Image: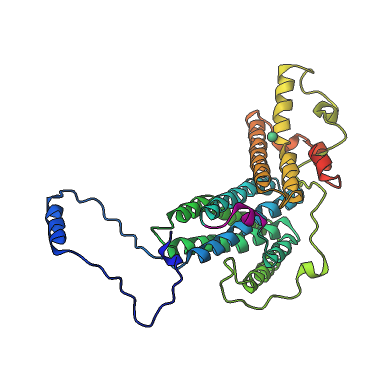
Amino acid sequence: MNPESQDTARSSTPETIPAISFAHQRDEAAERRKEYPFRFPADLRQLGGKYSVAENSRRLLRFFYFERRLMQALGAWTLSIPEFEVKLETGRHIFYHADAARLLRERLNEQEARQKEIDQFRDQQIDRFIEEMLSANSACELLVGVHRVLGHALEMAYRHHLDDTDQVTDVPTIRCLRRILIDYEPMLQWADAAILAYVEGGVAEAPLASWRWHLQRLLASIGGVTGSDVRTESPTPLRTDSKAFLRGTVPLRDVRFDTFKNTGDYDAADAQERFPKDSYENLRLRFIRTQRDEVDAIEAFGTFIWHIRFKDFQSEHNLARITWDEARHTEIGHRALLACGYDPFELLNRLTGSTCRGTMEPAFAMA
Ligand SMILES: [Fe+2]
């Protein structure tokens, strides 16, 4: 139990805790101490932090909610990201946020909140921010909102929390946040580099800066990630004021890809055979191409997370884990094609698995 949880009223004179020592015991202890030969490293952490247990939980619950919402939010965009590298990386990030949510949820459950209360927690102001962030006009704008605005704000909030919480009693929270930051560091570094690559590749920088400014003001208007910062006025208008966010239904691919969806058979799509049917070489290439084309599975499971959002946390987490696996399968396929001597983009990309993520009912698409 955190000693700070006792919200006793403080009187104007500092409270002293009476300590009653018996002289002989104290002297004997001093004598025994002299006999003790070991000088172990001193642990300099101090007892006492800035938060009561209730305030600690309130902050962690917001962190949990932001992470859960980020997992779902990125899922909604998996079809609409054209750039292969960004789609793949986003498949990974979905799991990073899911797993951050899992760690925070476990820690909250150890504190005072019950699992059901944690899972049923909703915050309309955070939802409004997430929906606005999702109303990005491009994948690059999405990265700006998700990483440059919200991701950086969360990282900073975690670092502040690490410094401000009780260094002795709240070690499980410290360990939880440090583990989350292990994923955050490479994720945010990658996002900064990716946004720079978009700009260097011709995406106009000023609208990105405006979008960042807009979302930062919106986040500030709800008191930032913790809800405890001074609240500023909300920017107007929001994109979601005139048009609610609706996920894309078309599987987008960047210009390097040529695609087909008329058949599941690669030889039929190519209109010629590379290797004799049923030969080992034919099967091997089909297997590797299928792995690369599991880029459609990132879209399938990402979209599915969005559709089942808030139904059951464990199911959302399981789907996020699968989405991460599909990102790995995709990159294994891509690299294996390179290792076989192909330019992976010379091989047509099969879209049959992606097209059903469009307008079809999610349960049918999943089936
Ligand atoms: Fe897979």
Is residue 171 one of those drawn in magenta? no
The residue at the point 84 percent across, 40 percent down is 364
Q: Give the percent coordinates (x, y) of residue 158.
A: 51, 60
With 145 as the anchor, is 361 left or right in this view? Answer: right
Q: Is residue 54 above or below residue 349?
A: below
Is residue 115 one of those drawn in magenta? yes
Q: Work out which quarter of the rendered image holds the C terminus and state it.
A: top right
Q: Is residue 96 above or below residue 152?
A: above
Q: Give the percent coordinates (x, y) of residue 89.
A: 64, 47
- Quarter of the rendering containing residue 127: bottom right
Choose between 248 and 292: the one closer to the eye.
Answer: 248
Residue stretch rendered in magenta on the structure: 112-120
Q: Is residue 333 above or below residue 179?
A: above
With 93 as the anchor, is 138 left or right in this view? Answer: right
Q: Main secondary structure of the magenta part?
A: helix
Choose between 71 and 265: the one closer to the eye.
Answer: 71
Q: Is residue 55 above or below residue 344?
A: below
Residue 343 seen from this side = no
- Quarter of the rendering containing residue 140: bottom right
